[in-house]
């Protein structure tokens, strides 16, 4: 049981959320008006093209519990979350989106689980309002891959990007310097004492999601290559399988030749070349994904760069 007055941190990655931030701020204030604990709200502007950072500056100017930082370019939500985790000072941190799909009123339930001893508390989506069947389908496939192929069994099957983590988990996360990784998968892989609640993910209030197909595709590749050697193992199995069928086919060709009925060469040869060549290119592409990520990590570039900070610009 955690006792005494605590400082709770809220981390919000934001990209083109100028219309949502003020509403979110008011709802967070209302939640903490009913709690005894102090809080800080750190919003990481992932280099928005609208007035997101200006809105943050205005809020931070009137409330010293709010801090906004602007990244030097668009790094993606996972890097923005990592930036926030390096800035928080609270006893625990809640990560939630800026689009008001994650109700701030759910924070109370996350805190209750934390106070009972959980170090990671997931808010699992029981219903997803306002999202297309394609988006929901992609999500199901992704989490199925992570559980069945990658082997991260404890990842919530319906998805969770709204969660609370203890200070000890925050410090542990800081030890990881990987640039291409899913924070959600990493948290599940890390262990610690985990629990979950369910909630209804509401429809977006304003604007549209910046979660594009390109970003989703990168998340899938990062998640698989960061936690599994399964694709490389499959390459080995495919290689053995092709070699096996190649041997069988060669025996068939030799047998027909000995019987005086040789197989006509051009068509069968082209089929074999195209099939094997296609497999080789696919396997080289998979291997290239691993090699590229190894090269990217070896450069040891910073995960993100901060361009502006409301603390530095405060009077």
Image: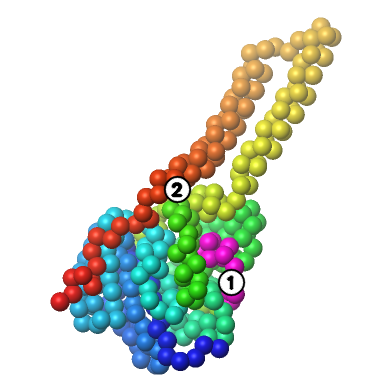
Instruction: Look at the numbered disc 1 and give the secondary structure of its residue.
Output: loop
Q: Quadrant of the C terminus?
A: bottom left
Query: Measuring 25% from the left and 81% from the top, which residue is drawn there?
Result: 64
Is residue 138 rendered to the left or right of residue 251?
left
Percent of width and height locating residue 190: 57, 65
The residue depicted at 65 percent of the width and 17 percent of the height is: 269
Colour setting: rainbow
Q: Any magenta on residue 138?
A: no
* Residue tagged 1: 192
Quadrant for the N terminus in the image: bottom right
| Closer-to-camera residue (146/134) | 146
Residue carrying label 2: 297
Residue 292, given in percent of the width and then of the height, sits at 46, 41
Q: Residues within 10 Å of mark 1 (few under 14, many from 20)?
A: some
Label disc, if present, on residue 282 of the rendered structure: none
- The answer, for residue 213, to whether it is visible in the render is no
Q: Residue furthest top?
A: 260
Placement of 230 over or under 237, stated as above or below? below
For marks 2 and 1 on the same chain, the one whose residue lies earlier in the sequence: 1
The crowding category of the residue bearing disc 2, from other C-alpha atoms within 10 Å (few below 14, some 14 to 19, many at least 20), is: some
What residue range appears in magenta? 184-195
Residue at image location 75% in from the left, 19% down from the top: 250
Residue 19: x and y, percent?
27, 71
Residue 47 lies left or right of residue 6; in this view the side is left
- Residue 6 % position (x, y): 42, 86
Say whether residue 190 is magenta. yes
- The residue located at (37%, 87%) in the rendering is 38
């Amino acid at each position: 049981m955690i006792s005494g007055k605590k400082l709770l941190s809220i981390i919000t990655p934001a990209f083109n959320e100028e219309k949502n931030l003020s509403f979110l701020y008011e709802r967070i204030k209302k939640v903490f008006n009913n709690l005894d604990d102090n809080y800080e709200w750190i919003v990481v502007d992932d280099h928005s093209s609208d007035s997101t950072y200006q809105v943050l500056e205005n809020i931070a100017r009137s409330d010293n519990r709010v801090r906004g930082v602007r990244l030097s370019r668009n790094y993606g939500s996972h890097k923005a979350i990592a930036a926030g985790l390096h800035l928080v000072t609270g006893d625990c941190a809640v990560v939630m989106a800026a689009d008001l799909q994650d109700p701030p009123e759910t924070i109370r339930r996350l805190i209750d689980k934390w106070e009972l001893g959980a170090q990671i508390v997931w808010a699992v989506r029981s219903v997803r309002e306002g999202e297309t069947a394609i988006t929901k389908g992609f999500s199901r496939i992704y989490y199925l891959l992570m559980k069945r192929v990658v082997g991260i069994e404890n990842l919530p099957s319906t998805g969770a990007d709204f969660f609370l983590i203890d200070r000890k988990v925050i410090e542990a996360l800081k030890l990881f310097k990987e640039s291409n990784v899913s924070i959600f998968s990493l948290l599940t892989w890390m262990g610690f004492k985990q629990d979950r609640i369910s909630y209804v993910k509401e429809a977006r209030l304003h604007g549209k999601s910046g979660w594009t197909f390109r970003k989703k595709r990168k998340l899938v590749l990062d998640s698989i290559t960061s936690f599994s050697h399964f694709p490389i193992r499959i390459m080995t199995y495919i290689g053995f399988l092709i070699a096996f069928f190649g041997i069988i086919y060669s025996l068939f060709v030799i047998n027909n030749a000995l019987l005086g009925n040789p197989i006509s060469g051009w068509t069968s040869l082209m089929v074999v070349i195209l099939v094997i060549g296609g497999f080789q290119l696919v396997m080289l592409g998979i291997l290239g994904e691993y090699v590229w990520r190894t090269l990217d990590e070896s450069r040891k570039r910073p995960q993100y760069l901060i361009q502006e900070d409301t603390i530095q610009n405060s009077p």
